């Protein structure tokens, strides 16, 4: 046992610090450079919405608000709930990252719920996780009529030839990203890639969730020091923020502002009344949506 414990620092470096930490940080760094100014969520929301509009992300035909709970809105609220848990407790990084493996899991759950919300707009519910991710990659990221609803860099994917399409990477106007960050994203996507399968970042997050859940969760006990903790916290929050916003935008353009605003109002009221907290990222995004008069 003594020898095994002595190997833990090296195991932690090889299995996390040199792999997943690098991959997550590369995704988040591109998000930071493209949309954020320091930690300014308001400006990030504006930049993301402006990018979606500039890309031509608009529904040709809106659906009528059904006036009752639907699986699309149920998944949207789940996305918000997991984002809240990821950010809690808000003020204390050390306490928030005490069980860091759960923060990775919460990030995946939030992103998957965001993806499932979009998929359920066009497909009946009760699809398997793998099927939902496959539909998202094939019928949304790759679909000419829908791909404009998805933001760089989280719209990057490996095609059936296991390559990131050039037209997607070219939208990232940052030379350093092309030299260092996109190659890291290419590596992380290859971890999740199966032959002849379109592979997206949510596919990778599922693999990461599986690794941290079923194999090496205990390794995250070694996540000490402000650097590794801060990098993980930064990366997960950025990845969830951008996935949440593009899903919210998609639903607003499909169902109309009032239908999604109602979900937002009810969720925030329940969050404040039942848990005594609020969600700053969610508040910021919706205040910005109001300014755009979508």
Image: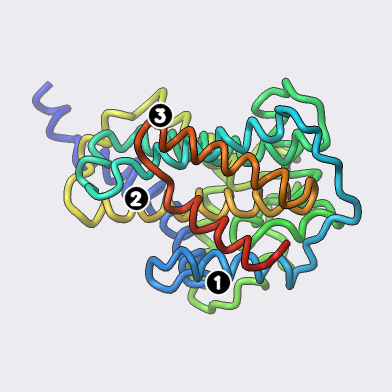
10 Å crowding of disc 3: few (<14), some (14-19), many (20+) = few
In this rendering, the label closer to the viewer, 3 or 2 = 3
Q: Which residue is mark 1?
A: 178
**Res. 97 image quadrant:** top left
- Quadrant where the N terminus lies? top left
Q: Which residue is mark 2?
A: 233
Residue appearing at x 27%, y 41% in the figure: 96
Disc on the earlier residue, 3 or 1 = 1
Question: How far is disc 2 from disc 1 in space, using C-alphas?
Answer: 24 Å
Task: Give the side of residue 155 with respect to residue 34, left or right.
Answer: right
Question: How far is disc 3 from disc 2 in space, using C-alphas?
Answer: 26 Å
**Res. 213 image quadrant:** top left
Residue appearing at x 75%, y 40% in the figure: 196
Residue appearing at x 43%, y 31% in the figure: 211
Q: Which residue is mark 3?
A: 274
SS class, disc 3? helix
SS class, disc 1? helix
10 Å crowding of disc 2: few (<14), some (14-19), many (20+) = many
Q: Nearer the viewer, residue 203 or 37?
A: 37
- Quadrant where the C terminus lies? bottom right
């Amino acid at each position: 046992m003594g020898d095994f414990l002595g190997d833990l620092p090296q195991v932690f470096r090889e299995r996390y610090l040199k792999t997943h930490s690098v991959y997550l940080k590369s995704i988040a760094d591109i998000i930071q450079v493209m949309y954020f100014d320091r930690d300014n969520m308001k400006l990030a929301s504006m930049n993301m919405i402006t990018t979606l509009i500039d890309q031509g992300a608009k529904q040709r035909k809106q659906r009528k608000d059904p006036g009752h709970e639907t699986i699309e809105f149920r998944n949207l609220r789940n996305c918000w709930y997991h984002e809240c848990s990821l950010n809690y407790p808000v003020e204390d990084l050390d306490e928030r990252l005490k069980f860091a493996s759960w923060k990775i899991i919460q990030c995946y759950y939030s992103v998957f719920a965001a993806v499932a919300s979009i998929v359920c707009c066009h497909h009946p519910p009760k699809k398997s996780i793998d099927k939902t991710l496959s539909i998202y990659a094939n019928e949304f990221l790759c679909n000419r009529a829908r791909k404009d609803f998805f933001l760089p860099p989280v719209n990057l994917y490996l095609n059936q030839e296991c390559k990131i399409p050039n037209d997607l990477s070219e939208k990232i106007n940052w030379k350093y990203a092309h030299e260092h960050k996109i190659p890291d994203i290419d590596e992380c996507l290859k971890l999740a890639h199966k032959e002849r399968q379109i592979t997206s970042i949510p596919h990778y997050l599922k693999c990461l969730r599986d690794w941290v859940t079923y194999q090496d969760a205990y390794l995250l006990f070694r996540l000490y020091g402000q650097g590794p903790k801060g990098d993980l916290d930064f990366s997960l929050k950025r990845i969830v923020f951008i996935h949440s916003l593009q899903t919210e935008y998609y639903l607003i353009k499909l169902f109309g502002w009032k239908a999604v605003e109602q979900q937002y109002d009810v969720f925030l009221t329940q969050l404040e009344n039942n848990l005594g907290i609020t969600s700053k990222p969610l508040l910021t995004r919706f205040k910005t949506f109001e300014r755009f008069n979508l």
